Image (cartoon, rainbow, N blue to C red):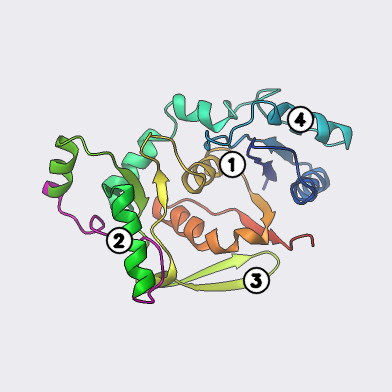
Amino acid sequence: MSVRVRFAPSPTGLLHVGALRTVLFDHLFAAKHGGHNILRIEDTDRTRYNPDSEEEFVTTLKWVGIEFNEGPHIGGPNAPYRQSERKEAGIYAPLIEELLATGGAYKAFETPEELDEMREFQKINKQATGYFGGNWRDASAEQVAEAEAAGKPFVIRQRIPRDRKVVMEDAIRGRIEWDSNLLTDPVLIKADGMPTYHFAAIVDDHLMGVTHVFRGEEWLPSFPIHWLLFEAFGWEKPVFVHCPVII
């Protein structure tokens, strides 16, 4: 197996020490195994986008001796390497349509006000807060078609399977189990058509042939969401390595 790792920062500010340690793990692991280290820019959050951050990432990492085999500044066989450009290239659209067709995702038309009311109801009734289906997880095709015909904006959410124990493997922690009933149905595609991190990162890891994902343990709550998304597509999962945070 040819090792392929990726460093995928969001260009929202300066590179922090935790991210620097993670990319160092990427770099050393790829170097040891004669693999490839990929730089991918995850710029789907356009409200926090900083156009100077990407150049600062590359400059800082070069200063500490970390170079990449593929990335937006050098190109490569998996270009483009910015997720906003990958969205414009139409990479994500057919895959979200596939997920909708197989029932792994659904369109949800709640307004922000309706979502606020739902969360307030959950708090008052001491329920877990989150989106566990709302009015649209089990909506009929006719209801969805009617909402679309009326021009209602929508997001696309992942359909998390219920009443299931999600069993995952982490290279550091070993076997991890998670009750799927505790997982909210996350947004995969925003109302403006931009993919969220949950969708774009998993799609890109698959398409770019990433074999090992190094990231901080703060991503453990998202681990079952990503694991289930790989399963929904029937894709081989990379090796996940959740590193302890720096305190």
Q: Residue furthest right?
A: 64
Q: Position of residue 212 (x, y in %)?
A: 66, 51
Residue to which mark 1 is pinned: 209
Residue 130 in magenta stretch: yes
First in sequence: mark 2 or mark 3? Answer: 2
Q: Is residue 181 above or below residue 14?
A: below
Where does label 3 land, which residue?
174
Main secondary-structure element of the magenta-colored stretch: loop
Q: Is residue 179 above or below residue 137?
A: below
Q: Is residue 65 left or right of residue 149?
A: right
The residue carrying mark 2 is 133
Q: Secondary structure at mark 2?
A: loop
Badge 1 amino acid:
Gly
Residue drawn at x 19%, y 38% as measured from the top left: 148
| Spatial CA span between label 1 and label 4 | 26 Å
Among the 4 quarters of the image, the one containing residue 139: bottom left
Q: Amino acid at mark 2?
A: Gly
Question: Dot 1: within a 10 Å radius of its alpha carbon, few (fewer than 14), some, or many (20 or more) residues?
Answer: some
Whether label 3 touches label 1, CB < 8 Å: no
Magenta region, residue range: 125-142
- Depth check: give the residue in front, 90 or 148: 148
Residue sitting at x 50%, y 63%: 224
Q: Residues within 10 Å of mark 4 (few under 14, many from 20)?
A: some
Q: Would you call the spot at circle 3 few (<14 residues within 10 Å), some (14-19), or many (20 or more)?
A: few
Disc sitting over residue 56 in the figure: 4
Find residue 108 and name its label.
none
